[in-house]
Amino acid sequence: MIRKWMPSRKNPMTIGEVTDDILDKVENNREGEYYYSYCAGNAKYKDIYKLVVHNPDSYFIDIKNFQIYRFIMNS
């Protein structure tokens, strides 16, 4: 889902921390909208991702590439 990710001064989270954060919010149903962004060096465009947690559905949206992923939780 996340194409590339490197920690930076603006966002020091590692890819592992980002995925753990996403899974924590989805698994614990922390309702809200959360944004994650990555910008490599002097790149013009950022990779921006949006996590939407809203009971009963959760979505992860890759805004730059127009892709939407739906989380399906097993009971």
Image: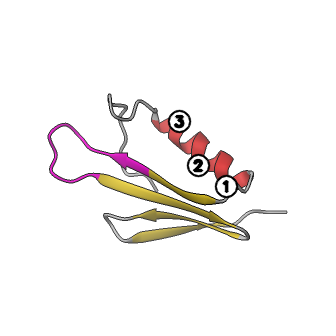
| Tag 2 residue | 22
Q: Which residue lies at the image location 37% right of the left edge and 41% below the top edge? A: 5
Q: Which residue lies at the image location 16% right of the left edge and 46% below the top edge? A: 43
Q: Nearer the viewer, residue 54 or 41?
A: 54
Is the Cβ of the residue at disc 2 closer than 8 Å to that at disc 1? yes
Secondary structure found at label 3: helix
Res 16 label: 3
Q: Which residue lies at the image location 72% right of the left edge and 68% below the top edge? A: 55
Is the Cβ of the residue at disc 3 closer than 8 Å to that at disc 1? no
Residue 70: where, in percent of width, then height? 59, 69
| Badge count | 3
Q: Which residue lies at the image location 72% right of the left edge and 53% below the top edge? A: 27
Q: Nearer the viewer, mark 2 or mark 3?
A: 2
Figure check: 69 above or below 23: below
**Magenta span covers which residues?**
36-46
Residue 75: where, in percent of width, then height? 85, 63
Is-magenta flag for residue 70?
no
Secondary structure found at label 1: helix
Secondary structure found at label 2: helix
